[in-house]
Amino acid sequence: MRKIGGTLALMFVLSSIAASVSFATTPIGLWVTVDDKTGARRSQVRIDETKGVLTGRIEQILEADKRNANCIKCTGPRRNQPVLGMTIIEGVRLNGGEGYWEYGSILDPNDGKVYRVRLTPKNGGRMLEVRGFLGPFYRNQYWIRAE
């Protein structure tokens, strides 16, 4: 009996470690977006996964003067829609074995442009490098894990 209890305890500890490691190396969760030019905290984006595909939605706008903003520069169905609640990350999938997620897109509600995106967890998953591509050019933002 004693050996079985010790084995179960060890299995529990190992599974807990594995769960925390996978959480730390994934973009799934709630993130505080940080402006790459000013360093200001702008919003909170929740990234979820469904069948291996990530999407991200604006859950909270931290800038008081923009909380009720609409995406006036967006095109298509997002045009003039509220930024709060808007899906801004779509179609992102894990790049097999490379440690980052890509193939999808990200919308910048400030300019209405859609960019190719790469998401790379950094600092043990406490930070997320968000790289938006337009042709050969790119821009990075570093988001902070909120939960």
Image (spheres, helix red, strand yellow):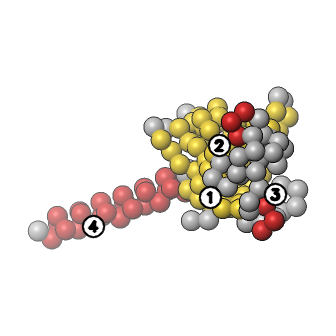
Q: Mark 4–mark 1 contact, CB under 8 Å?
A: no
Kindly identify the amino acid type of the residue bearing the numbered disc 3: Asp
Q: What residue would you read off at disc 1?
A: 59
Front one among 40 and 19: 40
User: Percent from the top left, x then y, of residue 57?
Assistant: 62, 50
Residue at the image point whose x is 88% and y is 56% from the top: 37
* Label 3: element kind: loop
* Label 1: element kind: strand
State the quadrant of the C terminus. bottom right
> Which callout, 3 or 4, points to the residue nearer the camera?
3
**Camera sees residue 7:** yes
Mark carried by residue 9: 4
Locate residue 15: give its quadrant. Answer: bottom left
Kindly identify the amino acid type of the residue bearing the numbered disc 4: Ala
Q: Residue furthest bottom?
A: 2
Is 83 positioned to the left or the right of 11 in the image?
right
Mark carried by residue 89: 2
Q: Nearer the N terminus, badge 2 or badge 1?
A: 1
Residue at the image point whose x is 62% and y is 65% from the top: 146
Q: What residue would you read off at disc 3?
A: 35
Q: Residues within 10 Å of mark 4 (few under 14, many from 20)?
A: few
Q: Residue furthest top?
A: 135
**100 is higher (above) or lower (below) than 25:** above
Q: Mark 2–mark 1 contact, CB under 8 Å?
A: no
Q: CA distance from mark 2 to mark 1?
A: 13 Å
> Which callout, 2 or 1, points to the residue nearer the camera?
1
**Camera sees residue 27:** no
Residue at the image point whose x is 61% and y is 47% from the top: 56
